Amino acid sequence: MELLISLLIFILLLFLYPVYIKWAKKKQFGQFIRKEGPALHNYKEGTPTAGGLLFVISISVLNFIFYFLNSQPLYYIIGLTTLLFGFIGFLDDFLSIYKKHSTGLNSIQKLILQFIFSGIILYIIQLNSPETSIIIPFLDTEINLGLLYIPWGVVFISGMSNATNLTDGLDGLNGFIFTSSMIFTILISGFNNVEFIYAIVFPVIAFLIFNIKPAKIFMGDTGSLSLGAIFAVYLMYNSMDAFVIFTGIIFIAELFSVIIQVSSFKLRKKRVFLMAPIHHHFELKKWSEERIVMTFLLINVLFSLIGFGGM
């Protein structure tokens, strides 16, 4: 039943995305390119954005339906997470288009909302699964965070939300990395959890068909902020936070490349990378978008396969 419902939503999205793209072009609901970004991205200005709205709604609907079918709490937690972080992203995209500027919400406003929504999600997780331990890969042991669980969770969920947002800089990159990360994370957590692939990954694959270079649509912050939160919440619910270094290696690399770049420039007045996030560094090294996406995807798959041995 779950697979059939997911396939129907997938097929529906294949029809809805062309309609949305046409509507967005007509309404000039397009992407604004950051002036600080690579100049070779300027041609992407005006490409329809906020395409993540369709898969955010789809993921939420599927997870709520699956919850009513089998009463697994993680389904409605994922559904709620998707809606809350999708709301932050949509607000950011809407303000960006309204102001005709690449920035909608400022970083502090985003972070405050992320912290609040992360706290709400963690409270619900604790009501359904009061486990506060983290599995340590390959060591057959766990670390109990106790009272640190909530503060850690707020930072972890918000951090991953921002990590996927930073990864969303090349055609297809964020979608491919998230798809591989989510599939491997779900399978590592247990092959009996395969229905989560239907509920989370299928809608993103439908979007990817229109986001592969040359992208006809971008997911915008509506999609990118929600994907990282979904990924983090699934990891935390299954006590798999530490597995992020395997199944989320590219997200970690993108996030820390920015942290390192900013810290280095503030402390040493020197840049470590030509540009951050790190995918832009390789762009300025004359790598094609396709080469970067494929290389990052292969690295992500390789580390995810290693992660299988850690459970």
Image: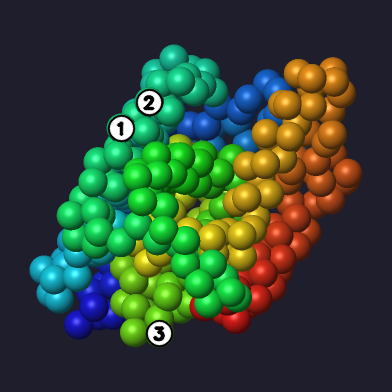
Q: Position of residue 80 (x, y in %)?
A: 24, 50
User: Gap in Å between the C-alphas at discs 2 and 3?
Assistant: 36 Å
Q: Check disc 1 and report its element: helix, strand or loop.
A: helix
Amino acid type assigned to the residue bearing label 3 in the image: Phe
- Disc 3 crowd, CA 10 A, few/some/many (<14, 14-19, 20+): few
Asked whether the viewer can see residue 174, the reply is yes
In the picture, residue 26 is in which quadrant? Answer: top left
Amino acid type assigned to the residue bearing label 1 in the image: Ile
Q: Check disc 3 and report its element: helix, strand or loop.
A: helix
Q: Check disc 2 and report its element: helix, strand or loop.
A: helix
Q: Nearer the viewer, residue 66 or 158?
A: 158
On screen, 152 above or below 233? above
**Between discs 2 and 3, the one toward the N terminus:** 2
Q: Position of residue 161 (x, y in %)?
A: 47, 43
Asked whether the beta carbons under mark 2 and mark 1 sit within 8 Å of each other, the answer is yes
Q: Residue at x 75, y 62 (%)?
A: 295
Left or right placement of residue 120 versus residue 68 in this view:
right
Q: Nearer the viewer, residue 310 or 54?
A: 310
- Disc 2 crowd, CA 10 A, few/some/many (<14, 14-19, 20+): few
Asked whether the beta carbons under mark 3 and mark 1 sit within 8 Å of each other, the answer is no
Q: Which residue is mark 1?
A: 116
Q: Which residue is mark 2?
A: 112
Q: Which residue is mark 3?
A: 191
Q: Position of residue 187 (x, y in %)?
A: 46, 78
Q: Residue at x 44, y 15 (%)?
A: 99
**Between discs 3 and 1, the one toward the N terminus:** 1
User: Gap in Å between the C-alphas at discs 3 and 1?
Assistant: 33 Å
